[in-house]
Image (cartoon, rainbow, N blue to C red):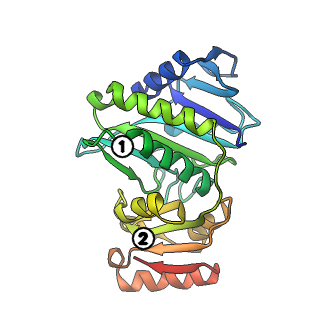
C-alpha cells in the first residue's frame, strides 16, 4: 500500500472544510512538527500549516517523513470564476512567480495521480454544474523529493464552501488511502494543451494513459532539454510516451520539442 500524507493551509477554506469532514469521519488528534493542526486518519497524517500551499517546501519531512506520496488539498481560483474540480502537478516552466524555483518541476507518480483523479471523478459525477478537469503544471512547491499532487475545488467562496463538493473531496481522499493503486497504465506527459486540457482529461479517465506533467501551449516555447528531461526523470514510474496536441504548437517549436523527445527515447503520439 502507498503511504500517503495529506496537507492543507489553515487559511484555505477548502483545506479547512475537507479536513473537518475527514476528522468527523474518524480522525484522532496527533502531532506533526511545525503544523498548526495534526490528525491521524486511518494511519495517514493530515496536517494544517500556516503557510500558503504554494510555499509548502517542507513536506518531505512533515507531516510524515516516511510518506511515499503527498496530497495537498486546496482552493482553486481562476479569472473566469468557473465552477471547477481539478487535480494538477506542481512546477514552474519559466519564472517562479507563485512559489517554488524557476524552471523546476516537482516529482510525480502518474499511476497514483490517475488513481486519485478517477476516484475524484467517481465521487463528483453528480456535481454536473462543475467542470471536472486536469490542469497543466503550475506554481510551487517544486523542490520536494517526493511526488506531490494538488486536489482542488473552485473557483469562488461559494464553491469553496459547497458542502456537496467538500464531501465529495473528503470521500475521495478516504477512498484513495484505503485502496490499492493499479499501476497498469502508460506513464505519459502532455504538451500543447490549454491550461485545462480537455483531451488529456478524457484520456486520463478513459484510456490506458496516466499523465505526469502537462505543459500548456502557452509555455511550449520555454521547453528545452532540461525541462523535458525533468518531466521524464522526475516521474516514477518513468515516462514512456509524450502526447502532443499538434494544433496547439507552432511548427518550428514543435520540431524542436520532437527532437528532444526522440533524444529522450519517448514514443510521440499526436492528438
Q: Where does the image place residue 22, in percent across and percent down from the top left?
A: 53, 23
Disc 2 packing (10 Å; few <14; some 14–19; many ≥20) = some
The local crowd at label 1, few if under 14, some if 14 to 19, many if 20 or more residues have their Cα within 10 Å, is few
Q: Say above or below: 167 vs 226.
A: above
The first of marks 2 and 1 along the sequence is 1
Q: SS class of the residue under badge 1?
A: loop
Residue 1, which numbered label? Answer: none
What residue lies at 67% left-to-right and 65% top-to-bottom?
A: 238
- Residue 168: x %, y % from top left: 42, 33
Residue drawn where x is 41% and y is 53% of the image:
135
Tell me where residue 159 appears, x and y as whole percent: 30, 31
Instruction: Determine which residue is flagged by label 1.
Output: 125
Which of the 4 image quarters holds residue 266?
Answer: bottom right
- Quadrant of the image containing the N terminus: top right
Task: For residue 86, say whether it is visible.
Answer: yes
* Residue 101 seen in render: no
Instruction: In the rendered view, tell whether residue 183 sits above or below residue 253.
Output: above
Q: 10 left or right of 249?
A: right
Left or right, residue 196 beside residue 103: left
Residue ID at (59%, 32%): 6
Kindly identify the residue that appears in the image at 70 percent across and 22 percent down.
Answer: 33
* Disc 2 target residue: 220
Q: Is residue 37 above or below residue 267?
A: above
Q: Nearer the viewer, mark 2 or mark 1?
A: 1
| Residue in front for this viewpoint, 236 or 201 | 201
In-front residue for pair 35/149: 149
Secondary structure at badge 2 equals helix
Q: Which quadrant, please, contains the C terminus? A: bottom left
Amino acid at each position: 500500500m502507498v503511504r500517503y500524507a495529506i496537507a492543507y493551509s489553515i487559511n484555505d477554506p477548502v483545506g479547512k472544510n475537507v479536513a473537518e469532514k475527514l476528522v468527523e469521519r474518524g480522525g484522532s488528534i496527533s502531532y506533526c512538527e511545525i503544523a498548526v493542526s495534526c490528525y491521524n486518519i486511518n494511519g495517514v497524517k493530515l496536517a494544517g500549516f500556516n503557510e500558503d500551499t504554494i510555499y509548502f517546501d517542507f513536506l518531505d519531512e512533515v507531516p510524515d517523513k516516511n510518506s511515499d506520496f503527498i496530497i495537498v488539498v486546496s482552493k482553486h481560483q481562476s479569472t473566469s470564476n468557473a465552477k471547477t474540480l481539478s487535480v494538477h502537478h506542481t512546477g514552474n516552466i519559466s519564472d517562479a512567480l507563485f512559489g517554488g524555483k524557476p524552471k523546476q518541476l516537482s516529482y510525480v507518480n502518474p499511476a497514483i495521480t490517475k488513481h486519485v483523479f478517477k476516484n475524484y471523478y467517481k465521487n463528483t459525477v453528480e456535481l454536473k454544474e462543475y467542470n471536472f478537469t486536469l490542469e497543466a503544471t503550475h506554481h510551487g512547491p517544486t523542490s520536494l523529493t517526493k511526488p506531490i499532487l494538488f486536489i482542488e475545488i473552485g473557483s469562488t467562496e461559494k464553491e469553496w464552501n459547497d458542502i456537496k463538493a467538500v464531501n465529495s473531496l473528503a470521500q475521495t481522499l478516504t477512498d484513495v488511502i484505503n485502496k490499492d493503486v493499479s499501476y497498469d497504465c502508460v506513464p505519459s506527459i502532455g504538451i500543447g494543451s490549454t491550461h485545462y486540457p480537455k483531451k488529456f482529461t478524457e484520456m486520463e479517465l478513459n484510456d490506458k494513459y496516466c499523465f505526469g506533467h502537462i505543459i500548456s501551449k502557452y509555455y511550449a516555447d520555454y521547453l528545452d532539454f532540461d525541462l523535458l528531461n525533468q518531466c521524464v526523470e522526475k516521474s516514477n514510474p518513468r515516462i514512456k510516451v509524450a502526447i502532443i496536441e499538434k494544433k496547439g504548437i507552432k511548427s518550428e517549436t514543435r520540431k524542436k520539442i520532437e527532437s528532444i523527445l526522440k533524444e529522450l527515447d519517448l514514443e510521440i503520439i499526436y492528438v
